[in-house]
Image (cartoon, helix red, strand yellow):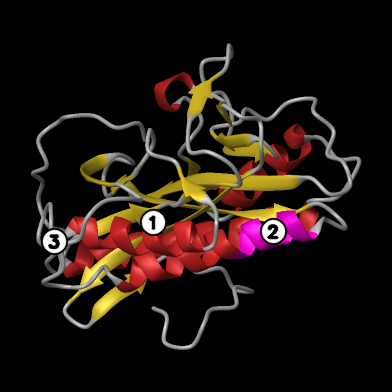
């Protein structure tokens, strides 16, 4: 979501509500694995959108992105210098493309939101490293989503890791709370000093989503009014999970069945 100044107050989720979000999260995680497995040279981004919509509906859920603020498809697919919110269409994927997948699922009125970047076929070391750093940055942000920490601790962990690896984090778009709506308070920036913002408690559910650029952090929206691209036209990578704050620490609700996670991650 883009940065706004709305008031950061909301109702904590009850355990039975988080149970319902777990269901939405499992479906979404499996959906993203299915779509990622389909990524190959010669397919169009619209082909991948059809894979996502079919999977979601076949599992009794609703593709949350269709019609959301006018978005026309089930999944956002952003390629190479596109950061987020790419509209599926006739674009044909090429060998070595960096492909970012972002999808949302609704079941029983509860949302899950997740995504990640993958390489199309054989990719360059730069593409693979950018994807890996983005994934690791997300895990470092997730690790901070525990009771007693502040919202800004998440972004600080992301930013310091990403910049230490020689990349930059996007500042014009941020993560967010999630529940009955896809975008709820509080905002979750991927940058900032530690110790600021909301104090986390059990019942917070957050969509944490680092957007990492190979070059500078500045981005802009192109003429389709959706797709965000890097100003310097260098590569960008993205990763997102829906994460519940529990008394035991962070619980990732959208883990993919085939996802490899560092030891100790939630």
Can you say which quadrant of the picture contains the N terminus? top left
Structural crowding at the residue carrying mark 3, measured as other residues with C-alpha within 10 Å and reported as few (<14), some (14–19) or many (≥20): some
Q: Nearer the viewer, mark 1 or mark 2?
A: 1
Q: Earlier in the sequence, mark 3 or mark 2?
A: 2
Residue at mark 1 to residue at mark 3: CA–CA distance: 14 Å
Q: Secondary structure at mark 3?
A: loop
Q: Earlier in the sequence, mark 1 or mark 2?
A: 2
Label count reads 3
Q: Residue 98 location in percent, x, y?
A: 72, 47
User: Relative to residue 166, is residue 170 drawn left or right?
Assistant: left
Can you say which quadrant of the picture contains the C terminus? bottom left
Work out whether 49 lies above or below 33.
above
Structural crowding at the residue carrying mark 2, measured as other residues with C-alpha within 10 Å and reported as few (<14), some (14–19) or many (≥20): some
Residue 195 numbered tag? 3
Question: Which residue position is annotated with label 2?
Answer: 34
Q: Secondary structure at mark 1?
A: helix
Residue shown at 78% from the left, 61% from the top: 125
Question: Which residue position is annotated with label 1?
Answer: 159
- Work out whether residue 168 or residue 202 is closer to the camera in this orientation and state it: 168
Q: Residue 191 location in percent, x, y?
A: 32, 50
Look at the image and give the residue range highlighted in magenta.
Answer: 125-132
């Amino acid at each position: 979501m883009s940065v706004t100044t709305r008031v950061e107050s909301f109702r904590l989720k009850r355990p039975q509500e988080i149970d319902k979000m777990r269901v939405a999260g499992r479906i979404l995680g499996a959906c993203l694995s299915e779509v990622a497995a389909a990524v190959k040279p010669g397919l169009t981004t619209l082909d991948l959108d059809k894979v996502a919509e079919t999977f979601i509906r076949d599992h009794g859920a609703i593709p949350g992105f269709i019609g959301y603020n006018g978005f026309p498809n089930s999944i956002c697919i952003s390629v190479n210098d596109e950061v987020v919110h790419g509209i599926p269409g006739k674009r044909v994927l090429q060998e070595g493309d960096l492909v970012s997948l972002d999808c949302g699922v609704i079941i029983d009125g509860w949302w899950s939101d997740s995504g990640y970047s993958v390489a199309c076929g054989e990719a360059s070391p730069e593409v693979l490293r950018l994807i890996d750093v983005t994934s690791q940055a997300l895990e470092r942000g997730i690790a901070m989503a525990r009771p007693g920490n502040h919202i800004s601790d998440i972004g600080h962990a992301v930013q310091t890791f990403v910049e230490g690896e020689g990349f930059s984090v996007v500042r014009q778009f941020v993560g967010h709370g999630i529940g009955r709506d896809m975008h709820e308070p509080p905002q979750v920036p991927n940058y900032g000093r530690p110790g600021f913002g909301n104090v986390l408690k059990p019942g917070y559910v957050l969509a944490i989503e680092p957007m990492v650029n190979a070059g500078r952090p500045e981005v802009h929206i192109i003429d389709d009014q959706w797709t965000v691209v890097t100003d310097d036209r260098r590569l960008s990578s993205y990763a997102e999970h829906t994460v519940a704050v529990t008394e035991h620490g962070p619980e990732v609700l959208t883990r993919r069945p085939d996802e490899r996670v560092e030891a100790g991650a939630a």
